[in-house]
Image (tube, rainbow, N blue to C red):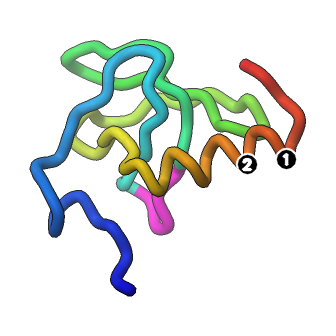
Amino acid sequence: MSAERPAETAQVVRPQQGDYAIDDSEEPGRMGLVLLVTPRYVQMRELTSGEEWDAAPKSVRKLTSREELSARVAIANFGLRW
């Protein structure tokens, strides 16, 4: 079974505030909760540590359904609710 990748399956969806997203500027991509979206940056919060960072808007995309499920499981396993 092939991995679900946005570039292969559909158009990349840009996240909005409150969405789970991934910053693909690093390898592997860094998942987080979108706190703020501006034309110059996207402010995100790490799912388990709570660390915040700013990312370039063009490197951030909304999670696929599979990635979002993985993120929600990670949050539940870590025991945090942001």
Q: Which quadrant of the figure contains the C terminus?
A: top right
Determine whether 76 is above or below 40 in the image: below
Q: Residue at x 89, y 35 (%)?
A: 79
Query: Looking at the image, which is closer to me, 53 or 62?
Result: 62
Q: For numbered disc 2, what is the local secondary structure?
A: helix
Q: Is residue 53 left or right of residue 80?
A: left
Q: Amino acid at mark 1?
A: Asn
**Residue 16: x percent and y percent?**
32, 19
Q: Which residues are magenta?
A: 26-30
The residue labelled by disc 1 is 77
**Residue 61: x percent and y percent?**
30, 42
Q: Residue at x 75, y 39 (%)?
A: 75
Residue 3 appears in which quarter of the rendering?
bottom left
- In contact (CB < 8 Å): disc 2 and disc 1: yes
Q: Residues within 10 Å of mark 1 (few under 14, many from 20)?
A: few
Q: Tell me the tag on residue 40.
A: none
Q: Is residue 56 left or right of residue 32?
A: left
**Residue 6: x percent and y percent?**
23, 58
Q: Main secondary structure of the magenta part?
A: loop
Query: Looking at the image, which is closer to me, 51 or 9?
Result: 9
